[in-house]
Amino acid sequence: MSNHTHLIANIPDGHLSETLRDLKKFTAKSIISTIMDGKESRREWMLNCFGFNANRHSRNKFFQFWTL
């Protein structure tokens, strides 16, 4: 199944929530940038999905990549 991921993490300093936030922010920006700049055949469909989810999220204006 390529539509999800599992992560096992151990953060020595105990700041798991901050580390997870930064990981999600970095990966979302990188993946969306790759989709926009690359030759992805499903580009429009994916960006529309991310845009739709952003409309349902109070802090995002353009794209919502990660879900709970």
Image (cartoon, rainbow, N blue to C red):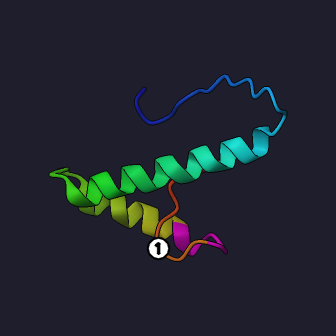
Q: Residue furthest right?
A: 14
Residue that appears at 65% across and 73% down: 59
Residue 54, x across and y down, in percent: 53, 69
Residue 30 counted in the magenta span: no
Whether residue 47 is situated above or below residue 19 in the rendered picture: below
Question: Which quadrant of the structure image shows residue 10?
Answer: top right
58 left or right, relative to 6: right
- Residue 15's image quarter? top right
Q: Nearer the viewer, residue 52 or 23?
A: 23
- Pointer 1: residues within 10 angstroms few (<14), some, or many (20+)? some
Query: What residue lies at 48% left-to-right and 46% top-to-bottom?
Result: 27
Q: Is residue 58 visible?
A: yes
Residue 32 x/y as whole percent: 37, 56
Q: Which range of residues does the magenta coloring cover?
A: 54-59
Q: Could you tell me which secondary element the residue under label 1 belongs to?
A: loop
Q: Tell me: 50 left or right of 43.
A: right
In the rendered image, the vertical position of residue 11 relative to residue 38, given as above or below: above
In the image shown, does 48 or 36 lie closer to the viewer? 36
Query: Is 50 on the left-hand or right-hand side of 9?
Result: left
The residue tagged 1 is 62
Amino acid type of the residue tagged 1 in the rendering:
Phe
Residue at 33% across / 57% down in the picture?
33
What secondary structure prevails in the magenta region? loop
Q: At which x and y percent is residue 23?
A: 59, 44
